Amino acid sequence: ITETYAFINKQSSSKTVRDQTNYILANIILRCKIPKWDEKDTLYKKLSDLLHSVLQETGTQYPHPEPYYLALLLFWPGQNYKQDDNWRNICTYVASLGK
């Protein structure tokens, strides 16, 4: 599934928010089954960059909650979190869910 969405994201000239969020979600679910991120966190970096571009495109008034839920899943602070922009924006993502 992740390979299919990677292909869609790479080959499509018009990437939809839905395709991008599905790709991110498929990778998050896969990582729940295989909990260790790669050593350099390249996949995490790639997913977070993609999600940032989706959130830039959708803004805070997007009528569907998927990008904001994905932000919570991907950016929620874990045991070894660093206080960064992702962490600071969680309140914005939560507030956007209620709109």
Image (cartoon, rainbow, N blue to C red):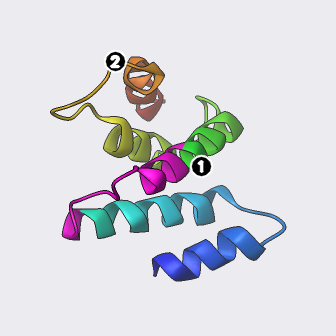
Above-or-below relation of 81 to 57: above
Q: Amino acid at mark 1?
A: Leu
Q: Nearer the viewer, residue 80 or 93?
A: 80
Secondary structure state at the residue bearing disc 2: loop
Q: Amino acid at mark 2?
A: Gln
Q: Nearer the viewer, residue 43 or 69?
A: 43
Q: Position of residue 63 (x, y in %)?
A: 57, 42
Q: Residues within 10 Å of mark 1 (few under 14, many from 20)?
A: some
Q: Circle 1 is placed at which residue position?
A: 50
Secondary structure state at the residue bearing disc 1: helix
Q: Residues within 10 Å of mark 2 (few under 14, many from 20)?
A: few
99 part of magenta stretch:
no
Above-or-below relation of 75 to 18: above
Q: Nearer the viewer, residue 7 or 56?
A: 7
At x 47% / y 29%, what residue is drawn?
Answer: 96
From the viewer's perspective, tell me whether residue 82 is left or right of residue 44.
left
